[in-house]
Image: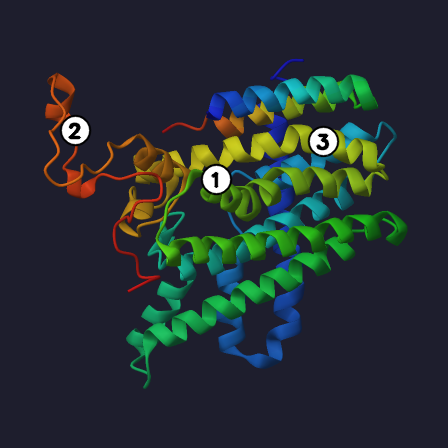
Amino acid sequence: MSGQAWDDDEQQRFRADLQAAIDAFLDEQAERLRPLGGDAERLVAEARAVSSGGKRFRAAFCHWGFRAAVRDDFDERALVRAGAALELLHASALAHDDLIDASDTRRGRPATHRGFAALHRDAGWPGDPEQYGAAAAILLGDLLLSWSDEMLRRCGLPLERVAPALDVLELCRTEVIAGQFLDVSVQARGRADVDAAMTVLRYKSAKYSIERPLHVGAALAGAGPETLTALSSFGLPLGEAFQLRDDLLGVYGDPATTGKPAGDDLVEGKRTVLVALALDAAPRRRPPGSTPPSGPRSATRRSPSCAGSSTARVPPSRWRP
Amino acid sequence: MIDDLAGRAVAALHRAREAVGLDDHACAVLEGLATAATRRAV
């Protein structure tokens, strides 16, 4: 199999078609919300911003999950709209995730809650700007989640083809939200364990980034359980590798490329798999009065106060006292 | 670890193509996407 089977021009056209589908859908929603005035306009403008750009992996895996399972002619526009539904789901997750993680930026611009807080502050409105920003991010995330479902339902394929894909999307939503809560709970307990961090990674990211988009595409193609299982065997480990790479980029990536500050996860005290593995590899705390390790390696080891096992207490987090 | 998982994924894709008859061209693209998703520059 060749990795050059989807050339750059085709990929660019796919991304442009995807953006056009999202723009058209948001135009419809803007029209629907017009009676609500300027506040709704700002909400839709933010929806446009958070659903723009990115690598569009979810839509691409949906598209090629479909194409892997079907060889007949197909409705290209409908398939693009189905992929766009997954990008709206992703945008929803980003708006909520940035609020939960108290992130300042996303793709080089203020995170949704920060942008709306700044708007509140600049306008000199009474009340708490941060509270307003948080409310806006929650509502925008909810709206995008709802629109994701609507866009898939109205993608243009016959309902009997769309219904199984909607079932997958329901499962996907449940997994990503439960995974997010598991993440928050792991942070709150303040213990970094590789297995727990891996479970968070699997549910919060790996499944909804690659495995479920493949399944949505294959379900639209009418694929049966055997094909879905086969696609899982590819999509799940790939999703895990994808998120591990993302964690690495979060620590060592160039902010100009990633659009977010490097080291945010460490500053936040996030228990990613990367952090859990680092703590696992760190030397154990020595009992009082024991002999320090000798040899050249000991000179470069971290202070015992920083060391610990994979379940050691890690730096303070805002999720616990 | 990342390369391990990505390698396992691509091996599984090859098996899946044979086992359930996935489309060859789509599998080739999926393999390319797998590389793009896991080799993003640090």
Instruction: Give the quarter of the figure containing the N terminus of chain A.
Output: top right
Nearer to the camera, A296 or B5? A296
> Is the residue at mark 3 from the same chain as the one at mark 1?
yes
Dot 3: chain letter: A
Occupied quadrant, residue A76: top right
The single residue placed furthest to the bottom in the displayed view is: A126
SS label for mark 3: helix
Question: On residue A231, which mark appears?
Answer: 3
Say whether disc 3 or disc 1 marks the residue closer to the N-terminus.
1
Give how far across and how far down residue A314 sits, in percent: 28, 48
Say whether disc 1 or disc 2 marks the residue closer to the N-terminus.
1
Please state which amino acid type lies under the numbered disc 2.
Arg
Occupied quadrant, residue A217: top right
Estimate how packed mark 3 is, as few (under 14), some (14 to 19) or many (20 or more) residues with alpha carbons within 10 Å: many
> Is the residue at mark 1 from the same chain as the one at mark 2?
yes
SS label for mark 2: loop
> In the figure, A285 relative to A191: above or below?
above
Name the mark nearer the viewer: 2 or 3.
2
Q: CA distance from mark 3 to mark 1?
A: 24 Å
Task: Tell me if label 1 and label 2 are in contact, CB under 8 Å.
Answer: no
Q: CA distance from mark 1 to mark 2?
A: 25 Å
Dot 1: chain letter: A
> In the figure, A181 relative to A138: above or below?
above
Instruction: Give the quarter of the figure containing the C terminus of chain A.
Output: bottom left
Q: Which residue is mark 2?
A: A301
Coloring basis for residues: rainbow
The single residue placed furthest to the top in the displayed view is: A1
Please state which amino acid type lies under the numbered disc 1.
Asp
Q: Which residue is mark 1?
A: A195
SS label for mark 1: helix
Residue B6 visible? The answer is yes
**Residue drawn 81% across the image and 43% down it:** A220
